[in-house]
Amino acid sequence: MLLIIKYLLVPGLIAAVAAVRGDKIAALLDRPGWRAASRALLALLGALLTVLSVVRYATMHSGYFDLGNYEAKIGAVLQGHAWSVIEGHWAPILLAGALPYAVYPSGVSLIVLQSILLLAAGLALKRLGETVLGKNEAAQVIALCFMLHPAVQYGWLFDFHPDAFYPLLIFLIFLWLETGNKWGCRVAALLATGTKESLTLCTGLVGCCLAGRPRLRRYGLMLALVSLAVFILYATLEKAGFSSASRAVLGYLGDSPADMGAGLVGKPLEWIATALGARKLFYLWVLSAPLALVFVRAPVMLIPALPLLFISLMSRDPAYSNIHNHYALGIIPFLFLAGVYGLARIADPSMRRRHAVAALLLSAYFSFAIGALPYSLTFWEDHGPFNFADYRPPRNRAQIEEAIQLIPPESTLTFQSNLYLHAMIERPQAWVFPDGLGMARYVLLDQGRAHFVWDKENRESYEEYRRSLQESYLRIYAQAGVELYRLKQERPAG
């Protein structure tokens, strides 16, 4: 009942207030001081999210999945292994992270880069809104809605991912289409095909949508074909990764793509029950409600989001439909594009202002109810990710640092994935627990944290692997839940 009040009744009341009093509220937003205030608020939100991101890393709450994973890839690029950016995921855009990482080789460089990208996306959206809607109150609020959206805030704080490039590139494609910058548009589209394989499919559908405009038909078809070719190239080069990703989404319907396709046809009740579960419907509501559903007036702009929506709804892995994860960063730009063009289709200026006010008020409310910042209710909850505890140093920080000092830099290491520091990957070989057991010279665990096995919490499996260490390893350090093990006998080379 509390959830119904919090996420349905209160938003309904806010929408009703906007419908009745929207013109008067919009009049306040049309004052000269509001534009300066909105720019200051954008800067404040961006600065706060950036500071929290860096603090979260500095207090040992980032994980190998995915900050360490991408830090290792970019570090490999600087050592001459450029192909690392297409191993596992198709993400050539990561090459752009090599320059800041070369200047300051730390996860902080990538976290700040992600902050710059998402703040720039908000500014590009603001410029697009002004181009399409004119410099009025409707255009002024759209970027604020972006920065207030819970999915943007959590994507901003969640370590580092190439998905963070995508909103900026999509907004630039449409901004430069509107302003006639053809070459800029082409460059942004080309870069968008290199963010991630699933996003490449979204970019191809952007091309299909643009092909529906007579003057953009050739450009749209070319973008669709290039994106499709890139996706096929990835699926060919990374067959194992592509198969693994497919099983993560539709594995409950079969092991092979053919079996999955047959399952979609032959087991409709099974996948419909998965797609329309309460968690999935809540995810869709939290994504869409902050925009006051204005995007329904421009549904074509939502078509490119279909591949990611399919993954989110069809997968039984809760990570794909979790507002706290980064996967929504690929859906968000199309919701906001549909919002901008949806507002543009409202001919009545008074109605447009009321819709814009509703979007701003609802965005502010959802940011308060389920957002990631200190003014949010969820920030002060005792459980859940990205709460206040995520920004405090662990009580055993001194013990963690002491254990790390006992590991020679030239030694190999297996470590718990949610216990990550840059020092973990500064060695010849590093694995994520329980990989590398029997080969890694050292194993580092922290029992004071969630018991992660690879990238998932699994206490039973964790304890089973931990007990097995006694066969091959000697525990040389155990303080405040931190345990360091050393291999009893090296395996012979070869």
Image (tube, helix red, strand yellow):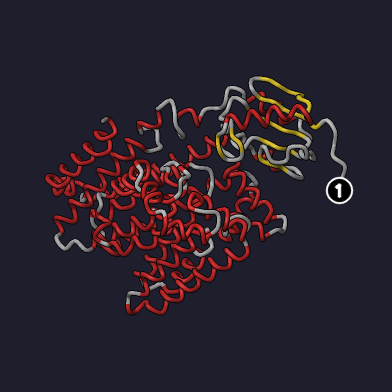
Image location of residue 171, percent across then percent down: 39, 61
Residue 47 visible in rendering: no
Quarter of the image where the N terminus is located: top left
Outermost residue to the front: 266
Q: Quadrant of residue 298?
A: bottom left
Q: Specify the amino acid type for callout 1.
A: Gly
The answer to whether 400 appears left or right of 329 in the picture is: right
Q: Is residue 336 left or right of residue 492?
A: left
Label 1 Cα neighbours within 10 Å, binned few <14 / some 14-19 / many ≥20? few
Residue drawn at the location 23% of the way across and 52% of the way down: 356
Quadrant in which residue 15 is drawn: top left
Q: In the rendered view, would you say 262 is above or below 219?
A: above
Q: Secondary structure at mark 1?
A: loop
Mark 1, residue position: 494
The one nearer the camera, 286 or 237, is 237
Identified at 13% across, 44% down, the residue is 21
* Image-based side of 362 in relation to 156, left or right: left
Total marks in image: 1
Residue at (64% x, 53% y) in the render: 74
Residue 8, located in which quarter of the rendered image? Answer: top left
Which residue of the protein is positioned furthest toward the right in this rendering? 492
Q: Name the residue at 63% across, 64% down.
A: 237
